[in-house]
Image (spheres, grey):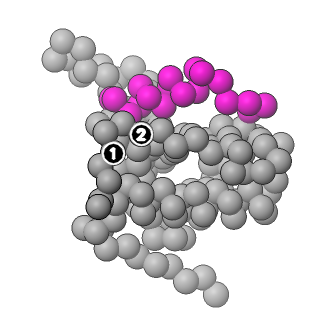
Amino acid sequence: MIVVFWLNRNCVTENDISRIVVDSAFKVHKSLGPGLLESAYVECLSYEMHRNGLLIEKEKPLPLIYERVKLEIGYRVDFLVERKVIVEVKSVEALADIHLAQVLTYLRLSGCKLALLINFNVPLIKDGIRRIVLRLEDPA
């Protein structure tokens, strides 16, 4: 039996969302392990996040605004979760500076404050998760 929890979208913070995403990534990695193509992890993570009640937009286009002109030039985030958190999935030997730069660009273009960069091609998924923050406020 599958139980779906629907979130109260008015009370969900970026930190709440990231906890659910990370838990979903742990479950996917535990089941599949490392070594698969990125597309397999994207589909399984999509299923898990949706199952956990998150509103997800997969392959969400991000336009670039240049001198007040909206340019559709092909930037796509793997997931925009609850319209607040970007999730970028990789299956690479090691995360590189270019992956971090990519996610920082996505944060700036989207106006989001938090992104998770998740590399599934690691023995322990905790070593493959990078949390990238721009202007995230502490809910004190």
- The one of 15 and 89 positioned closer to us in this rendering: 15
Say left or right for 90 vs 88: right
User: Which residue is painted at 67% across and 30% down in the image?
Assistant: 95
- Disc 2, SS: strand
User: Which residue is painted at 54% across and 58% down in the image?
Assistant: 21
Q: Are marks 1 and 2 in contact (CB under 8 Å)?
A: yes
Q: Residue 97: image x %, image y %?
A: 60, 21
| Residue 39 visible in the current orientation | no
Q: Which residue is mark 2?
A: 133
* Residue found at the far left of this picture: 68
Q: CA distance from mark 1 to mark 2?
A: 6 Å
Label 2 environment density (alpha carbons within 10 Å; few <14, some 14–19, many ≥20): some
- Disc 1, SS: loop
Q: Main secondary structure of the magenta part?
A: helix
Q: Of the residues shown, which amino acid type is indicated by label 1?
A: Leu
* Residue found at the far front of this picture: 140
The quadrant where residue 1 appears: bottom right
User: Which residue is painted at 20% across and 17% down in the image?
Assistant: 69
- The one of 106 and 139 positioned closer to us in this rendering: 139
Q: Of the residues shown, which amino acid type is indicated by label 2?
A: Val
Magenta-highlighted residues: 92-109
Determine if the magenta segment contains residue 137: no
Q: Which residue is mark 1?
A: 136
In the image, is residue 44 above or below residue 68? Answer: below
Q: Residue 130: image x %, image y %?
A: 58, 41
